[in-house]
Amino acid sequence: MTGIPGENNPESGDVGGHEQARQPLKDELKSSLAWLEHAALAGGDLVRLVGLELRLAIADSGKLAVLGLAMVPLLLLAWIGLSVLLGWLAFAWSGSVALSIVVFIVVQLATLGVMAALCKKYAKSLSFPATKRQLQTLKEETSGTKETEKSDSTAR
């Protein structure tokens, strides 16, 4: 009786002295290891895929920028064409060249007015209004605590 119970001896309650099955534990460890290897391979593939798609996106963003620059002159020509059409309609309606020129200029000035109003609106956000309010609140709280400290020290 020098053996450890459960170690291939009949004294452990194992009738025939057969080896107890440790196979399920080994199989589970092997399957876990295989799963980890598969996860590592999938992660590596994912990183590689992200790298390739990033390269493709960078190349396409350059092409997109060139197309955007090519569209600017076309948009300007379309806008001028629309303005000329409105001026021509004013001329056809009134027969006055002066009125058609005024309509053309008014269309341009109205567009500039809308753009200026939008620039003014967007410029307000560039001044960080929420941050300024937060700093103002912080200053008021800080000065408020200093004033209470001063009043507390003078009261003593």
Image (tube, rainbow, N blue to C red):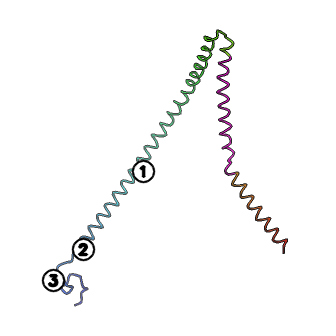
Badge 3 element: loop
Query: Where is residue 24 shown, x and y percent of the image?
Result: 25, 70
153 falls in the magenta region: no
Left/right placement of residue 70 relative to residue 13 reads right
Query: Where is residue 12 shown, x and y percent of the image?
Result: 21, 85
Which amino acid lies under the numbered mark 1 shown in the image of this protein? Val
Q: Are marks 2 and 3 in contact (CB under 8 Å)?
A: no
Provide the residue span drawn in magenta: 102-131
Instruction: Please report the residue visible at 22 percent of the width from the left and 90 percent of the height from the top.
Output: 1
Q: Mark 3 — residue?
A: 15
Left/right placement of residue 102 relative to residue 18 reads right
Q: Mark 1 — residue?
A: 47
Residue 107 lies, with reference to residue 49, above or below; the image says above
Tell me the quarter of the image containing the C terminus: bottom right
Residue found at the far front of this picture: 93
Disc on the earlier residue, 2 or 3: 3
- Of discs 3 and 1, which sits in the foreground? 3
Residue 121 lies, with reference to residue 66, above or below; the image says below
Question: Which one is in front, 106 or 131?
Answer: 106
Badge 2 element: loop
108 falls in the magenta region: yes
